[in-house]
Amino acid sequence: MLCDTGRGDWLLCQITSNPHSDPAAVKITPADLARGTLSALSFARPTKLFTANETLMAKRVAILEDAPFGAVLSTILGALKQVMPVQSDTADDVNQAPAV
């Protein structure tokens, strides 16, 4: 669970035992867990995000340590930055740009 999005919904990241040749996959080993266990070597897939209501979640099985959780978040932010529109440094740049 990444964060509470309100009304009982949570932003989630896919975790699977197969990285599916995903270059963004973050490996999760037993040493990466602050609490709980996973039944197999697992991979977080930070570019596979979704929301779900807490009523659909049976239980929390593990919690990541700060470093691997940070790696997942950094990967998400990096992916989002790649699709962000380029912004100028100042509002004056818009006024000085040639008309199209």
Image (tube, rainbow, N blue to C red):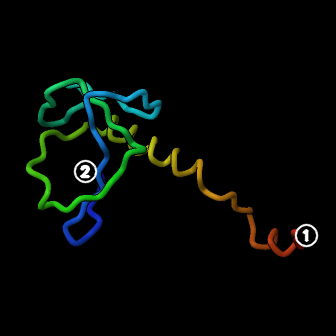
Quarter of the figure that contains the C terminus? bottom right
Query: Disc 2 versus disc 1: distance between alpha carbons?
Result: 46 Å
Tag 1: residue type? Answer: Pro
| Residue that numbered label 1 is attached to | 98
Q: Which residue is mark 2?
A: 1
Residue at (42% x, 44% y) in the render = 47
Mark 2 residue crowding within 10 angstroms, few (<14) / some (14–19) / many (20+): few
Which mark sits nearer the N-terminus, 2 or 1?
A: 2
Question: Residue 17 is drawn in which quadrant?
Answer: top left
Which residue is drawn at the image coordinates 9% and 48% (left, top)? Answer: 59
Q: Is residue 74 left or right of residue 29?
A: right
Residue 93 rendering spot, x and y as whole percentages: 81, 68
Give residue 20's position: percent from left, percent from top: 37, 29
The dot on residue 71 is none
Q: Position of residue 36 (x, y in %)?
A: 12, 35
Residue 36, relative to residue 90: is it above or below?
A: above
Residue 39 pos. (x, y %):
13, 27
Vertical order, 52 against 99 (above or below)? above
At label 1, counting other C-alpha atoms closer than 10 Å, the crowd grade (few under 14, some 14-19, many 20 or more) is few
Residue type marked 2: Met
